[in-house]
Amino acid sequence: MSNIKVELKKNQVDKIKEICKSFNNNPGELINALHKVQSTFGYLPAEVQEVVSQEMDVPLSKVYGVVTFYSFFSMIPKGKYPISICTGTACYVRGAETVLQEFKKELGIEVGETTADGKFSIGCLRCVGACGLAPVVMVGEKTYGRVSPEMVKDIIKEYNE
Amino acid sequence: MIKLTIDNKIVEVEKGTTIYKAAKKVGIDIPVLCYMDLADLGIEHKPGGCRICVVEVEGRRNLAPSCSTEVTEGMVVNTHSIRVLNARRIVMELILSDHPKECLVCPKSGNCELQSIAIKLGIRDIPYQEISEMSTYRVDFSPSIIRNMDKCIMCRRCETMCNEFQTVGALSAVNRGFMSVVAPAFEMDLEDSVCTYCGQCVAVCPTAALTEVDHTNKLIRDLANPNKTVIVQTAPAVRAALGEEFGLEPGTLVTGKMVSALRQLGFKYVFDTDFAADLTIMEEGTELLERLSKHLKGDKNVKLPILTSCCPGWVNFFESQFTDMLDIPSTARSPQQMFGAIAKTYFAQKINVKREDLIVVSIMPCLAKKYECQRDEFKVNGNPDVDYSISTRELASLIKRANISFNSLQDDDFDAPLGESSGAGVIFGATGGVIEAAVRTAYELFTGKSLEKVDFKELRGMEGIRQATIDFGGTPINIGIAHGLGKARQLLESIRKGESNFHAIEIMACPGGCIGGGGQPLHHGKTEILKKRMEAIYREDEGKTIRKSHENPYIIKLYEEFLGKPMSDKAHKLLHTHYVDKKKRIIYI
Amino acid sequence: MSDYKLHLLVCGGTGCKASQSELIYENLKKEIGNEGLSDFAQVVRTGCFGFCEKGPIVKIIPDNTFYTQVKPEDAKEIVAEHIVKGRKVERLLYTDPVAKKTAGSTREIGFYKKQVRIALRNCGIIDPENIGEYISRDGYEALGKVLTELSPADTIKIIKDSGLRGRGGAGFPTGLKWELAAKSPGNEKYVVCNADEGDPGAFMDRSILEGDPHTVIEAMAICGYCIGADKGLVYIRAEYPLAIERLKTAIKQAREYGLLGNNILGSKFSFDIELRYGAGAFVCGEETALIHSMEGGRGEPTLKPPFPAVSGYLGKPTNVNNVETFANIPVILTKGAEWFSSIGTEKSKGTKVFALAGKINNVGLIEVPMGITLREVIFEIGGGIKNGKKFKAVQTGGPSGGCLTEKHLNIPIEYETLVAAGSMMGSGGMIVMDEDDCMVDFAKFFLEFSVEESCGKCTPCRIGNKRLHELLDRICKGNGAPEDIDRLINLSYVIKDTALCGLGQASPNPVLSTLEHFRHEYDAHIIDKKCPAGVCKALMTYEIVPENCVGCTACARACPVGAITGERKQIHKIDPKLCIKCGACLERCKFNAVIVN
């Protein structure tokens, strides 16, 4: 028997099974189930997708195909403080790009990456709908409005103490 | 009926017909790339993705993909306006701008659909090269198939074959946009996925994104080695298709020419896998009868139906997807492996060559065979029973390389003793053939009577799932047949649910059986070719003097001299196998 | 609502929430409690007021006082002054940027003057989490009327007569769409609400769901009645947590009130709604892609026909409308088709919600009658261009639209006129650009979006947009060749002509429209190697003005690549070959000696 090594604890696997079951293991609810699983684990590592595939009876390649199609799903754990820079049009014309560059420079990581200490990750999102505050940056659930490149250092500092 | 105009020609077609098919009816051949019509297999793949087949429809804002746009009454279509030709050329240039420019050394050169359309469209320049980024991926080598997704054009035919037709689910479209590609989960190696190596993805790939592992150079080296004795076995389906590679009509039998060519290539002995097919019938048929008679006596422990096990793609399929049913298939090895085991024991002794110095090569219509001969169960002290397998296509390439004028070759005969076969061995190449061969033998052994008519036409055909009841002298025997793994899945699920009352089932992974294998000459969507190959197989059978496996004199001799009787200890050791549970299971930490 | 004399409406939309409006709400409540006025004045957390630029907003009714940019600590003063003493807090009142006059009530604010609110009629007025407030403003009256007085065909006729067209993009007549789904044979049908607002810079669907979720529920039920569906699905972006929460609450309340579920209002009609979450794919705004996504797969579009009305969700007849379209339905049915069609123009009836953003004074969400001019929207409602800069262009229709210029300012906003002008209505994003914006860079921005959001299914979008982006990128980097213009044009037209779905077909629009109206900017980039707006970094050169340089060495020390040379107290020099145009020297120089060309 060829086994894949799954770095999951039994209670974690049970949790995934429970989530799948709450959607009646219905393949049509794959995306809803993945949302729920991601909100539980923070991301969707291969092992987790493997369990979802078996429980919902969707080929693993299909699950992966769905995970990689939607930008909301991630296979990389986000930082403790995920930084999301809105790059919607309204924010872009009000300078989101320079803010993004500043964050990348300050943290030394690219979009989609997490700092080595696991503290910060940078992501882009398209319009949070707070265009009045453009450019907008979110750190976790907290929203920062009218962010300028000069503010970047201070924002990071807030979480570095 | 719907009346429309295409390029000023009036066409009348049925409702629901696409522009592409309507145009075809009046001799207008619109180029298509991602489109694939496997009508005989019930697959019409028309994602409308490549946009090569666009045409201008009067009154429509944009161009319409002819492969997937249905005709409407009074429609006026232009398939070659400047607008269309410009669009088609630019779309082609775009595809080529993200495609490696190495046609000269590409394995598909000359047989590549992308290349043919580029020629047809008169592409003379690939713009954007100085600025264009290419989508590149890691090349994935498995024992049977090479994936070079740099050459993928996202036609997604492979995805359809793997999921809809075969229901294997090894491949799916992954990623998004420019980096989207068809791949196994996590872009893992095919070898680690649920791939069965059936090769149907390779059979439909328009480019060289999916190709077989090529052993021809290795073979040339071995043939040149004076210390090795290189022998070859050829599978039944090869002779019914090889001629196509040399421009012969599909369905032309080239058995004699093939033997001749193999001899010219330098093989010491040219043998026939059909011989081993006869041997398979002896073992599998006996196993069937054993289980059957126990069952008829009321033994509840006996597992029925018995499933055939000659097809390695099918074996891989149930080993990973039907692991609860591993005790149902026959334990008999495939003919390729039976041949190898006999060649490296019985025959090696006969010609007094050491096992290590004997190289057994197989010519197969199949890509899963390449994997099969590498399995540990089929090795003795690390030395494989069959050293490697090359496909029908690879053989054709070798013959061309060796300047052999195939079509003018004289017919030659297989060598003895492993070259003699019955008609039953030949029909292994077509769906239903294995079970028909088994019935020919099992009937006689079961009833003790001689068959008056050996042709069981009710077992033949292209239906995906077929069933028939054969009267075994008063005992009705229910037979099931499936080809294509999707159909196999249906049958297996009905067995699992206890809904079937079959005694024996034959399963082949590929459409039409081995004649439609992943290693055969490419049919390019013309599935009527499969039927022609099938007819050829049955013609060969009819032409044989011996039609039943148990009447093959060399088989009888083999049992007398070496094996004893079917299912003997020795036969068990050499000719039977066991199955491995390949299902991935979660283990906890 | 009527038991109280005063209502303090606090905006609970996402924008204001991000500026601590929740705390303002809490503080106001506390202060009113402290003053012992809890029976007199009520604090209500509402949906978006639209005037996001000036958020957080607190509005007091009945006197319509409009406080802007309120801070949590202002709560005390508002209660002490306005509520207790009846004196408005002057400093928090809105000041008109043009007239420099404070506005005592919303009626005096330019931003609201020309607006007509139909889809947004309840946003910023009711508490979205209280079904009672929706009902008190005639909510569910339309559903009651339809179920008791009208046949599905009658209802569809009213919608058709109203002239309502889809508000999500292309403007397909809603009544006709319903009729097609109604006529489609089948017992199992679906109503789908497309709330996967993907246009970056448009947020009307979110505001409606956050501010008035019941209107969507009511409209979906009506649609279900009309087409013969008993199940509705809302496909909503997972990035909209507040909208999801409010919608869930609203669905629960509607069920409790018997407005969803079996035998609604005692009729034979049953209807219920489920949510399906989008997961960040712009293409899922396309209805076939949306349906595939709802079925749990990759959101790839498929060829139409078959239209969803014939074969949609799970292969069953399905009617898909977007949020704003649905929000119009209940009012049309209570006030009549004639009333609705009296608003707007001949071919475009009713109103349209726009998200005004970019270089404009009044960023926010507005609803205007069709036929209003761009000039009125930008300069009257929008309050003109920020910082007194010059207007350059406005992009409507998001990444699928095009830019419109000075010469288009007087055209009426209608589906057809916008298309004729090279843009489109789209979902209602309206991004205003000023003289500091580079149009080549702007086209590149949208192409980058289209490349990132392409599903990858068809060649023109998957590879074509990538090549368009590469061409634009090299132009912005100063490496453009004169023939690139022709390539851009030819490639753009072929993509429009051959892409599989509406999004792919529309993706070259920003390129074509900027090429049409701002060809000179492209030429400047390609031929003169200059970016007139000073946006494209690679085309900038940094220089030191000798007259201003004092030789302080600050710039040389700041330069990360050592491109600046010069001895102390000597004039410094920048080596253009080494300069990476980071701007560090400019930032550091205290003597205005560094200039950018």
Image: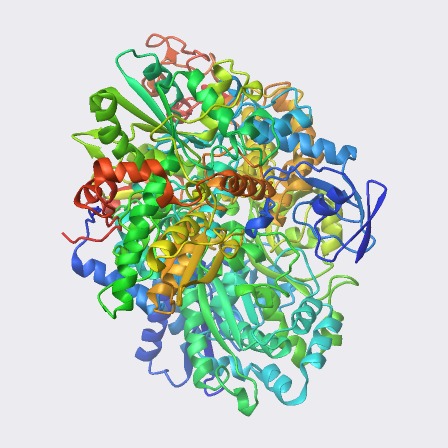
Task: Write down the quadrant of residue B259 in the picture.
Answer: top left
Say whether residue B133 is visible: no
Determine whether C380 is above or below C244 in the image.
above
Does residue C346 appear to the left or right of C10 in the view shown? right
Task: Please state which of residues C415 and C98 is positioned toward the viewer in this rendering.
Answer: C415
Residue located farthest toward the bottom when viewing the structure as drawn: C266
Nearer-the-camera pick, C577 or C479: C479
The answer to which quarter of the image holds residue C137 is bottom right
Q: Is residue C364 above or below residue C49?
A: above
Tell me where residue C570 appears, x and y as whole percent: 37, 8
Left or right: where C498 falls relative to A99: right
Instruction: Identify the colour scheme used.
Output: rainbow
Give residue B297's position: percent from left, percent from top: 25, 69
The residue depicted at 45 percent of the width and 67 percent of the height is C275
Using the image, determine if residue C133 lies above or below residue A100: below
Rendered residue at 61%/76% (across/down): C330
Please name the residue shown 74% across and 47% down the image: B22
